[in-house]
Amino acid sequence: MKRFVKPLLYAAAVLLMSVSCGKKDPTSCGPEDQRYKYMKTVKNARADLYQNAGFIIEGGDGPLICPFQVEKFATYENTYVRGKPQPFKYRIWGRIFDCGGCPTLTADPFPHIVIDKIEKID
């Protein structure tokens, strides 16, 4: 019995390390050198995708997609049309962050969104 304990503890340690190292921090939105601060959570919000770079959310928010998710939305249909009533073809759930460390031309918040769930509305 004694000789089974050491390999079991080793296997448990390896498993814990592989699980903890592979996860992305749920509060992060981009590279470590930029500072992203949580602003709010969005649930079941109607939105349109704008040039695969950001969402226009009904009610006024227009966050960019967080850097680590940009590729994920490259194949999604752009539904935003400037100057026309918006169809709001998506429902989104996620978290909006302000990027205080991102270079901007204004002092306004620079919002980014981490999409947790998205549904297309037909």
Image: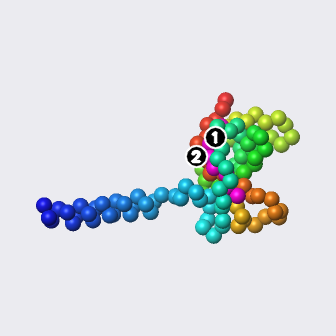
Residue at 72 percent across and 55 percent down: it is 111
Tell me where residue 71 appears, x and y as whole percent.
61, 53
Residue at 63 percent across and 70 percent down: it is 33
Pick the front one: 39 or 89: 39
Residue 93 among magenta residues: yes
- Name the amino acid type tagged 1: Lys
* Magenta residues, start to end: 91-98
Which residue bears the numbered disc 2?
Answer: 116
Judge whether 26 appears above or below 89 on screen.
Answer: below
Q: Secondary structure at mark 1?
A: strand
Residue at 23 percent across and 61 percent down: it is 8
Q: Nearer the viewer, mark 1 or mark 2?
A: 1
Q: What whole-number distance in Å separates the C-alpha atoms at marks 1 and 2? A: 10 Å
N-term-proximal mark, 1 vs 2 = 1
Q: Which mark is residue 43?
A: 1
- Name the amino acid type tagged 2: Asp
Say which quadrant the N terminus sits in: bottom left
Could you tell whether 62 is left or right of 32 in the image? right
Mark 1: few, some, or many residues within 10 Å (few <14, many ≥20)?
A: few
Judge whether 25 appears above or below 41 on screen.
Answer: below
Could you tell whether 101 is left or right of 26 in the image? right
User: Do we see residue 80 in this rendering?
Assistant: no
